[in-house]
């Protein structure tokens, strides 16, 4: 599904990602962990193609196609989707209108999708305007559900979400990643940034990676990595000389 | 008066019918409770099917109701400027008078069409009265034929009287041409508990529009809301203002403008004067410059007593790249993403406006979106 080779990325002429290599197969969900500022969000933004993230070396391939220099909307159109951690507010643009732009003008279906995420009262609201942390997450998951990408990138999907809503969001994300489909037939893949690991209860992630200082330091079983990090923090990861 | 849905003398080419439709004028009268059509200086018809509302030509109204002398030129002074003087000295004043009788509350709008079909100065004098408890909604479609060029102008005097607990909404949609100059001169008097909603939409090229309507809030808890949504194309000059004078306790005003320059000039003026305690006013102007032009916001708030609360916010800027890219991440290409954001920027929902009129405003803006912002 996704193949990242020797990727180097600059923001404002400063290299922030160094030599990233990562391969995510069809139907796989990977988890990205690491301390704040280690470059996790930067990697997601780069994969989606945002303008401030300049690839200086390396390649990103998606479904076999080199997308390193493809514009954002073209990546979205071939099946990449992203849940933003801090999406912008767009005054006057109704959430329902954006959903219609991505999903097609099918108000009943859109209302039904929104209802499942407890967002049906937000369709006539300006996108993200006055939304709480949890409402932003639900709005993002709803937009991704409408978009139905093959490869889903999630930036801290559980942050700011109360316990009541985490299962709602968790299940919806599980559906996005076809966790209800048998592993053999599952096609959708994901890359998830998480600090707490709560989201793992709904995702059954296949692989975990730890990122420090703009590099992927190690790979492993996501639950084991999480356990280590919870027990000792990232200090040892920073000192670890193992290169992935 | 009508034959086959076409008013005699209004058998216009499709292009001009389209321009009128964009301005909110339904020549077939669908969803309109009354209609006034004026072409150049000729009154084509003035009619209303609603028993509580009268739609009359200015001449007929003055003959029928001599008491209207107490209303004409009482809010807009005759000698205010050269344009009012020009209209005041006409031997044959033309325009319309709409009177919503006490307690009438039809929410279907009356349409007032002022159509300029040749290179001349069109002058009108209008008086709109909502008596106690009455509700009156008017869509004023002002348009010129597509061929009208240099020398075409429109001078329009409008005086609004909103009685106790009455409401007038006045939605003016302009579809003029690149050579036409437009000078509306309007004022409103709002009594206790009355509401005046004044909406202005201009999405099409025009040489110059200059206006500064004023609402005098005379009665306690009177409300005025001005909303303007405008685009200035290259060579267009839109010098727009609105003023509210808060003269009674509990009165309030809101002045909202969304302005886009595509190379033209927009001067967005506004003035709220708080003359009595327990009054509130807010003025908001947001401008977006899409191509080098000029947006000049001059918000003025003037408090004269303890207990008046006035505020303003004005911003001129560009579309944030972050917003464009957010929508691109959902699969919209850059052009569509940009247009979607601009459409959102122009989206002003006016509380208290009947749905049919809100739709009319939305349609005018949608058509600008389709033509490409």
Image (cartoon, coloured by chain):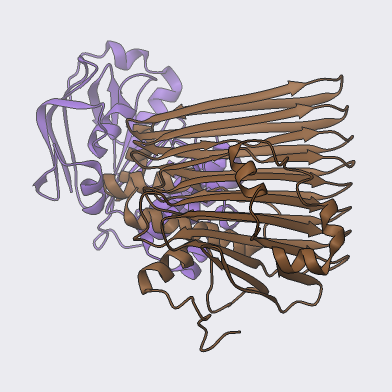
Chain colours: A purple, B brown
Instruction: In this rendered view, identify the residue nearer to me: A39 or B163.
Output: B163
The image quadrant of residue B187 is top right
Classify B227 as above or below B20.
Answer: above
Question: Could you tell me if residue B139 is visible in this image?
Answer: yes
Which residue is painted at 82% across and 46% down in the image?
B190
Residue B149 vs residue B72: left or right? left
**Residue B285 image point, x, y percent:** 56, 33
**Residue A223 image point, x, y percent:** 38, 36
Which residue is painted at 68% across and 74% down in the image?
B33
Question: Could you tell me if residue A205 is visible in this image?
Answer: no
The N terminus of chain B: image quadrant: bottom right
**Residue A233 image point, x, y percent:** 41, 18
Instruction: In this rendered view, identify the residue nearer to me: B269 or A86.
Output: B269
The image quadrant of residue B214 is top right
**Residue B156 image point, x, y percent:** 60, 50
- Report the residue that reaches farthest toward the top: A239
The image quadrant of residue B360 is bottom right
Residue B139 vs residue B71: left or right? left
Instruction: In this rendered view, identify the residue nearer to me: B341 or A119.
Output: B341
Report the number of numbered marks. 0
Which residue is painted at 52% across and 34% down in the image?
B286
- Report the residue that reaches farthest toward the front: B91
Which residue is painted at 37% across and 74% down in the image?
B13
Instruction: In this rendered view, identify the residue nearer to me: B290 or B120.
Output: B120
């Amino acid at each position: 599904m996704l193949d990242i080779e020797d990727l180097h990325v600059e923001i404002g002429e400063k290299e922030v990602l160094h030599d990233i290599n990562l391969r995510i197969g069809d139907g796989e969900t990977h988890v990205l962990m690491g301390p704040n500022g280690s470059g996790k969000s930067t990697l997601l933004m780069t994969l989606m193609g945002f303008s401030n993230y300049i690839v200086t070396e390396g390649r990103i391939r998606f479904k076999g196609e080199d997308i390193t220099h493809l514009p954002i909307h073209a990546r979205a159109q071939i099946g990449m989707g992203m849940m933003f951690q801090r999406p912008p507010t767009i005054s006057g643009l109704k959430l329902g209108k954006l959903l219609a732009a991505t999903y097609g003008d099918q108000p009943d279906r859109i209302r039904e999708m929104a209802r499942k995420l407890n967002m049906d009262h937000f369709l006539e609201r300006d996108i993200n305007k006055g939304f709480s942390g949890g409402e932003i997450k639900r709005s993002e998951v709803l937009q991704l559900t409408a978009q139905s990408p093959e490869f889903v990138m999630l930036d801290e999907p559980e942050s700011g979400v109360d316990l009541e809503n985490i299962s709602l969001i968790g299940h919806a994300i599980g559906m996005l990643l076809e966790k209800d489909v048998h592993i053999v037939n599952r096609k959708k893949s994901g890359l998830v940034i998480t600090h707490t690991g709560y989201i793992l209860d709904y995702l059954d992630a296949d692989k975990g990676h730890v990122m420090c200082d703009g590099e992927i330091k190690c790979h492993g079983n996501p639950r084991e990595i999480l356990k280590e990090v919870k027990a000792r923090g990232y200090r040892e990861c920073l000192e670890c000389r193992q290169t992935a | 008066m009508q034959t086959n849905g076409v008013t005699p003398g209004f058998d216009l080419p499709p292009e001009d019918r389209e321009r009128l439709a964009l301005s909110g004028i339904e020549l077939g009268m669908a969803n309109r409770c009354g209609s006034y059509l004026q072409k150049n200086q000729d009154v084509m018809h003035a009619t209303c099917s609603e028993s509580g509302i009268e739609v009359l030509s200015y001449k007929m109204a003055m003959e029928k109701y001599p008491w209207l002398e107490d209303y004409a030129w009482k809010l807009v002074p005759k000698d205010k400027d050269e344009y009012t003087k020009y209209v005041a000295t006409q031997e044959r004043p033309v325009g319309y008078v709409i009177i919503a009788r006490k307690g009438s509350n039809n929410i279907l709008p009356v349409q007032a069409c002022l159509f300029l079909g040749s290179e001349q100065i069109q002058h009108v004098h209008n008086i709109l009265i909502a008596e106690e408890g009455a509700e009156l909604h008017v869509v004023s479609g002002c348009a010129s034929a597509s061929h009208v060029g240099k020398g075409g102008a429109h001078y329009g005097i409008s005086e609004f009287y909103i009685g106790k607990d009455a409401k007038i909404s006045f939605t003016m949609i302009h579809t003029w041409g690149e050579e036409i100059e437009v000078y509306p001169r309007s004022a409103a008097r709002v009594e206790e508990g009355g509401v005046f909603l004044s909406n202005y939409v201009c999405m099409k090229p025009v040489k110059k529009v200059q206006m500064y309507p004023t609402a005098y809030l005379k009665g306690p808890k009177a409300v005025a809301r001005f909303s303007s949504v405008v685009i200035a194309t290259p060579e267009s000059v839109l010098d727009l203002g609105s003023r509210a004078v808060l003269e009674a306790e509990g009165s309030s005003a809101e002045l909202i403008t969304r302005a886009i320059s595509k190379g033209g000039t927009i001067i967005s003026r506004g003035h709220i004067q708080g003359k009595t305690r327990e009054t509130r006013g807010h003025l908001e102007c947001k401008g977006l410059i899409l191509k080098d032009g000029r947006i000049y916001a001059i918000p003025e708030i003037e408090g004269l007593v303890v207990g008046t609360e006035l505020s303003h916010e004005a911003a001129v800027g560009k579309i944030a790249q972050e917003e464009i890219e957010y929508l691109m991440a959902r699969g919209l290409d850059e052009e569509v993403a940009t247009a979607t954001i601009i459409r959102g920027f122009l989206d002003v929902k006016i509380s208290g406006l009947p749905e049919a009129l809100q739709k009319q405003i939305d349609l005018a803006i949608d058509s600008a979106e389709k033509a490409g912002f």
